[in-house]
Image: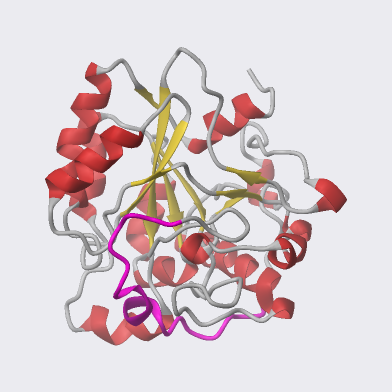
Amino acid sequence: MIPVIPVRRFAVTCALGTLGVALAACGAPGTPHAARPGHSASASAAPSRPPTLAPGPAGLTPVFKNGPRTPDKTVALTFDADMTADQGARAAAGEHFDNPKLIATLRGFKVPATVFMTGRWADEYPEEARDIGRDPQFEVANHSYSHYAFTNDCYGLPTVPKDKMRADVERAYTAFKKAGVPHAMPYFRFPGGCYDRTALRALSAVGVTAVQWDVVSGDAFATDADAVARQVLEGVRPGSVVVMHCTQSAAPATEEALRTIIPELREQGYRFVKVSELIGRAAGHR
């Protein structure tokens, strides 16, 4: 699930006390290396290379937090599809780490969105991953394979060893391809939102832009949809990236909250976009 950031982190208002329990065991990071996103044979068939930010100082992976604060009032809703390796038995027993109703609601409102998916989630729900990935209304981005943290002391999550960080991200892209996602985006969200220079350096060869956020929805483990909606509506500014979740068991109020958030933001004049559009604007693409 989601906590928060900037190279160390700032305080987050959502309820995260049980985060470490819910996400503690994330499966051993894998080692297979996938082709770099946007440079594989399948990606070459895409109409154009998705926009990314230029590398940071010393070639570090660039970090994107929000788009330009322009008067046209765009906002990107992003949804983390989290699942860890030890949760397979729970899924088999009937626990839902997916949320088809939420995806259906986005479709019903015709709201584009970016889904940050773990490779483990794609392995568990390949048909849903493929359905989302092939729908032009959505874009699939990388949230690691294992949902291990990329720093120490990240909300109780186990940690990916430095020499396995790149492999974990690439393993997720391999899982997306196996599920049938045709063009996963070259964007990566750190589990827990935790990163440091070591992590940024380790991922520099993957060719991704790290995507954070500027609005925390507080939907993780929340049961009050009105409170989630209120937190989003109070936080959104032009160019905002909102972090939410599409895992029913760990974010049960999110779908209901969207039924308030979407009409209200539209009433305020906001236009919903994917993260790629905001990054394109920030990178000077038009």
In the picture shown, does residue 49 fall above or below 172? above
Q: Residue at x 61, y 72 (%)?
A: 151
Which quadrant of the figure contains the N terminus? bottom left
Is residue 12 shown in magenta?
Answer: yes
In the picture shown, does residue 247 fall above or below 149? above
Tell me residue 21's x, y (percent).
Answer: 33, 82
In the foreground, 166 or 130: 166
Quarter of the image where one finds residue 241: top left
Q: Identify the residue at the far front of this view.
A: 11
Answer with left or right where residue 247 lies relative to residue 121.
left
Tell me residue 242's x, y (percent).
Answer: 39, 42
Which quadrant of the figure contains the C terminus? top right
Q: Residue at x 54, y 73 (%)?
A: 149
In the foreground, 279 or 34: 279
Answer with left or right where residue 249 lies relative to residue 75.
left
Q: Is residue 128 visible?
A: yes
In the foreground, 96 or 269: 269
Tell me residue 218's x, y (percent).
Answer: 29, 53
In the foreground, 161 or 42: 161
Q: Residue at x 28, y 87 (%)?
A: 89
Q: Identify the residue at the far top of this view.
A: 71
Q: Main secondary structure of the magenta part?
A: loop
Tell me residue 262's x, y (percent).
Answer: 23, 31
Please state the extent of the stretch shown in magenta in the rendering.
11-31
Is residue 131 shown in magenta?
Answer: no
Q: Residue at x 19, y 26 (%)?
A: 263
Q: Is residue 256 visible?
A: no
